[in-house]
Image (cartoon, grey):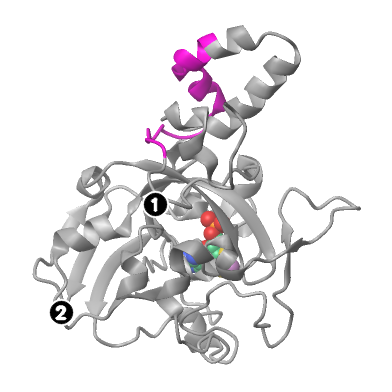
Amino acid sequence: MLIRTHDDGFSHSMTSEITSAGVYQRRRELMQLMASGVAGTALASWASRDALAQAARPGKLAALPATKATISGGATMEKVTDYKDASTYNNFYEFGTDKDDPARTAHTLRTKPWSVEIEGMVKKPARYQLEDLIKLSTQEERIYRMRCVEGWSMVIPWVGYSMSKLIEKVEPLGSAKYVEFVSLADPKTMPYVGSAVLAWPYVEGLRMDEAMNPLTLLSFGMYGEVLPNQNGAPVRLVVPWKYGFKNGKSIVKIRFTDREPKTAWNKAAANEYGFYSNVNPNVDHPRWSQATERRIGEDGLFAKKRKTLMFNGYEAQVGQLYAGMDLKKNY
Ligand SMILES: Nc1nc2c(c(=O)[nH]1)N[C@H]1C(S)=C(S)[C@@H](COP(=O)(O)O)O[C@H]1N2
Ligand SMILES: [Mo]
């Protein structure tokens, strides 16, 4: 029953019955209990799983309950990165350029009240209050591999729903070909907004079919709780087959357009950061290889580098989006 059949074995194993956050921790706990001969006890608590879910949550922020992932690729069985690492090793340049800056300084971010403006080529432009946006669809836990363009990776249990749910709601016009995601740029609460490291606000974008792919997640939480500020509270994007910088944090505007959005990293260095930014071990960054990666948490003296996977391992789900495209040109 706990034998996994393939990487995304949730739907084929007993774990598919588990619907709350913290599955990964409980799996480990169960393994330990089985080894110690008290599996019966563990299975009993499996039934009353709320207590265990509580224990598995970091317990730092408000709980954000979620169902299990419903899509293929939505729940990698790889070991989840420790919450500590996921919430202290961050890129969020609005709060500084060192990995530990956001965790130290993002407490100034004001996430209440928060609203997200939907504009551009849509039949139903709107301004959603965060509370309404959260309720727009069922929150799911999606355990995704994440790969930063700098060569490190993590496995993070996000909470949110497919971006497609929101897109369907606002009804884009036929002429809309791209979606632009704009992050908050508030110099009063974000110390690096105004600095020369990037053009502000932070802007990212996807082609409409990429935004509509069920893997593309509008995320409000991680590890069963609402997002910590440093991870892009209160709402951010997660596109697991692309380099991390495509995942705009603290989003305030979503704009539908017929032009390829001018993204922050592309503006900063067009030869290094293209619009697509699909994870691809065969296309080097001009200054380094992308063939391998360092999994955060595995960086001991003898830790081996991992081979980076095409589309970060999500080729079955998204490969067809790029059929016929030259991915060396469209990097
Ligand atoms: N607004 C904004 N979004 C951002 C960034 C940023 O600097 N500003 N950094 C990106 C990069 S490079 C990465 S790797 C991921 C990191 O997300 P995490 O800290 O939640 O792991 O956020 C992305 N989203
Ligand atoms: Mo990144």
Amino acid tagged 1: Ser
Q: Secondary structure at mark 1?
A: strand
**Mark 2 nearby-residue class (10 Å; few <14, some 14–19, many ≥20):** few
Q: Position of residue 308 (x, y in %)?
A: 68, 66
Q: Earlier in the sequence, mark 2 or mark 1?
A: 2
Q: Nearer the viewer, residue 192 or 119?
A: 119
Residues rendered magenta in the picture: 44-68
Instruction: Report whether residue 101 is seen.
Output: yes
Mark toward the viewer: 2 or 1:
2
Question: Which residue lies under the disc numbered 2?
Answer: 174
Q: Residue at x 46, y 52 (%)?
A: 108
Q: Position of residue 293 (x, y in %)?
A: 72, 64
Magenta span contains residue 131: no
Q: Is residue 43 above or below residue 191?
A: above
Left/right of residue 186 with respect to residue 46 in the rendered view: left
The residues tagged by marks 2 and 1 sit, at their Cα atoms, a distance apart of 26 Å
Instruction: Report whether residue 200 is seen.
Output: no
Amino acid tagged 2: Gly
